[in-house]
């Protein structure tokens, strides 16, 4: 019961982080979105048998979190919550793919384990970069950045409203769950039947509310588009931010830095 | 020419499922009047309000705002003239940040950015919420949400303010502040409410609705003192006009009965 409430409180925390001020927070949202998209594309493009090549890329989310004053533990917790989905996808790789891929002398590692590691690494990198982006930009700024970059309004407005009303929906659900818990003794009243009618109830309430919100929007002249106030301008430092990071990602993609480092170290020894 | 007149003639409306809501409503509200719309739950107050800004179209009769009837063409103008404050601020405040929400109306009116900013800030200042402008709206208290909801409408400089239960869910202090705030506006005000004491403070005129019809329309003081009328309409005298339970004998028997039973 408490978990729903604390979950929503937690999303609010993400929002609070975005209202801090740091050099990262001041970068134009569009630039941050573009940089993150490019980062994700580069991470995804790595071969599934090359988890080591991904390692240096961790510098991007780390840098954003450090400079943006985003607590690591917070992002890590969020990653843990999402990890079961990824693990369930990657779990079968070691079983299905048993061809040896890595020879470590005494024993060899199968291709399945290597690709498993690669999927997990890709997940950690992309998800932490996405979360760090939201934490140091704010969801509303991201939506406005997306719409200014040409993403269709229907999509960005949906996103914006999803974010605004997930709190209201959460509170509504929490109130219903509480009301049910207070009047169900032992396990009676907690069964599937009640649960499904609660979900239905929640849907009806949501539709009612959607109608009222639409009315409120019409009353204030909504014409299918949300005009964002005070548009920010892209300045030189923003361009440098984008160019610098993209350059680094491209270099790390084209040259296998860990392999080179390994070879150099081997030569020195 | 005045934009401040609201004229409703023989207005009828039933919901799609057949429930009749309004059954021939008539009234005319002129410039600067402050009118209370009172009636029991289900008397048709909210349905009537939805007609005043063109969200519902009359099935019979007409609604005129200022000099124009409400039609598709005049809708934009009507909605700017009639500022509507909803009962649940969570419906009214749909953007993540207070400032964006207050600026939403003026921006949609196509005003230049400087004007939007100036209107937004002055509307927030007027309701005493200037310090909230960068806060996410879901985190405000009920009183703050209500104040901001009113600002979202004021920023469009409407001539007529329509409010649905403005004092519901407020603590006594916040309620008092709101009444004080509203008393300072010189807009035409139409307030649908169950808060009879607020009516006494704010409204010079009251319209009583019962089963979709106007059963009384007159000076608020008179209507609020008419016990039979109020009783038949599912209402009660304002507490201040009821006898004091300690020093007045008039209301004592009632109270004793309750205690005994």
Image (tube, rainbow, N blue to C red):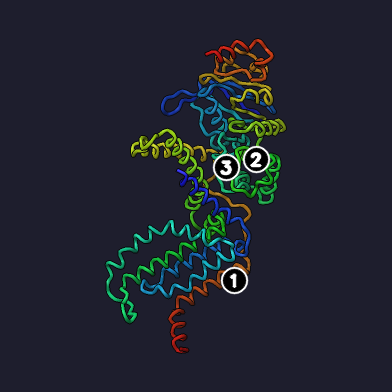
Identify the residue at horizontal 52%, vertical 24% (top origin): B41
Query: What distance separates the C-alpha of mark 1 from that of mark 3?
Result: 37 Å
Query: What distance separates the C-alpha of mark 3 from that of mark 2?
Result: 10 Å
Location of mark 2 (residue): B151
Location of mark 1 (residue): A240
Q: Position of residue B102 (x, y in %)?
A: 62, 44
Question: B181 or A145: nearer the eye?
Answer: B181
Q: Secondary structure at mark 1?
A: helix
Q: The residue marked by circle 2 belongs to what chain?
A: B
Quarter assignment of residue A267? bottom left
Q: Is residue A120 left or right of residue B249?
A: left
Q: The residue marked by circle 1 belongs to what chain?
A: A
Query: What distance separates the C-alpha of mark 2 from that of mark 1?
Result: 40 Å
The quarter in which the N terminus of chain A is drawn is: top left
Q: Secondary structure at mark 2?
A: helix
Taking B95 as reference, is A175 above or below it?
Answer: above
Question: B167 or A185: nearer the eye?
Answer: A185
Quarter assignment of residue B237? top right
Count of marks placed on residues: 3
Question: B159 or A56: nearer the eye?
Answer: A56
Tag of residue B109: none
């Amino acid at each position: 019961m408490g978990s729903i409430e604390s979950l929503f409180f937690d999303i609010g925390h993400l929002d609070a982080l975005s209202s801090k001020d740091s050099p990262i927070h001041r970068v134009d949202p569009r630039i941050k979105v573009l940089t993150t998209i490019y980062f994700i594309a580069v991470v995804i493009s790595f071969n599934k048998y090359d988890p080591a090549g991904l390692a240096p890329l961790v510098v991007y989310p780390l840098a954003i979190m450090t400079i943006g004053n985003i607590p690591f533990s917070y992002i890590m917790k969020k990653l843990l919550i999402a990890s079961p989905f990824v693990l369930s996808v990657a779990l079968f790789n070691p079983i299905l793919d048993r061809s040896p891929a890595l020879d470590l002398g005494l024993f060899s590692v199968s291709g399945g384990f290597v690709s498993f590691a690669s999927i997990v690494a890709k997940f950690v990198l992309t998800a932490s970069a996405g979360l760090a982006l939201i934490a140091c930009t704010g969801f509303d700024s991201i939506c406005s950045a997306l719409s200014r970059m040409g993403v269709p309004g229907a999509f960005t407005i949906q996103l914006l409203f999803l974010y605004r009303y997930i709190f209201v929906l959460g509170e509504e659900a929490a109130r219903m769950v509480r009301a049910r818990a207070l009047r169900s003794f032992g396990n009676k009243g907690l069964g599937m039947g009640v649960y499904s009618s609660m979900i239905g109830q929640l849907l009806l309430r949501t539709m009612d509310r959607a109608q009222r919100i639409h009315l409120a929007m019409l009353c204030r002249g909504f014409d299918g588009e949300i005009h964002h106030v005070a548009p920010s301008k892209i300045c030189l430092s923003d361009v440098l931010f984008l160019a610098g990071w993209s350059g680094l990602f491209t270099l790390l993609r084209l040259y296998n830095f860990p392999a080179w480092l390994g070879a150099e170290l081997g030569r020195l020894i | 020419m005045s934009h401040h007149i609201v004229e409703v003639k023989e207005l009828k409306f039933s919901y799609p499922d057949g429930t009749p809501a309004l059954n021939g409503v008539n009234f005319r509200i002129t410039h600067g009047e402050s009118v209370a719309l009172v009636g029991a739950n289900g008397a048709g107050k909210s349905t009537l309000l939805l007609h005043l800004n063109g969200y519902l179209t009359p099935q019979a009769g007409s609604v005129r705002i200022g000099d124009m009837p409400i039609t598709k063409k005049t809708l934009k103008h009507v909605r700017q003239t009639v500022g509507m404050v909803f009962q649940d601020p969570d419906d009214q405040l749909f953007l993540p940040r207070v400032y964006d929400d207050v600026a939403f109306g003026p921006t949609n009116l196509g005003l230049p950015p400087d004007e939007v900013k100036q209107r937004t800030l002055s509307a927030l200042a007027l309701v005493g919420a200037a310090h909230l402008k960068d806060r996410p709206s879901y985190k405000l208290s009920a009183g703050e949400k209500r104040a901001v909801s009113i600002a979202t409408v004021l920023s469009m400089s409407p001539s007529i303010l329509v409010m649905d239960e403005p004092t519901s869910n407020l603590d006594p202090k916040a309620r008092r502040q709101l009444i004080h705030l509203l008393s300072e506006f010189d807009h035409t005000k139409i307030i649908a409410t169950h808060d009879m004491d607020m009516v006494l403070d704010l409204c010079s005129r009251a319209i009583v609705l019962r089963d979709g019809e106007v059963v009384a329309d007159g000076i608020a003081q008179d209507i609020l003192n008419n016990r039979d009328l109020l009783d038949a309409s599912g209402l009660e005298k304002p507490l201040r006009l009821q006898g004091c339970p300690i020093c007045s004998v008039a209301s004592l028997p009632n109270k004793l009965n309750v205690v005994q039973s």
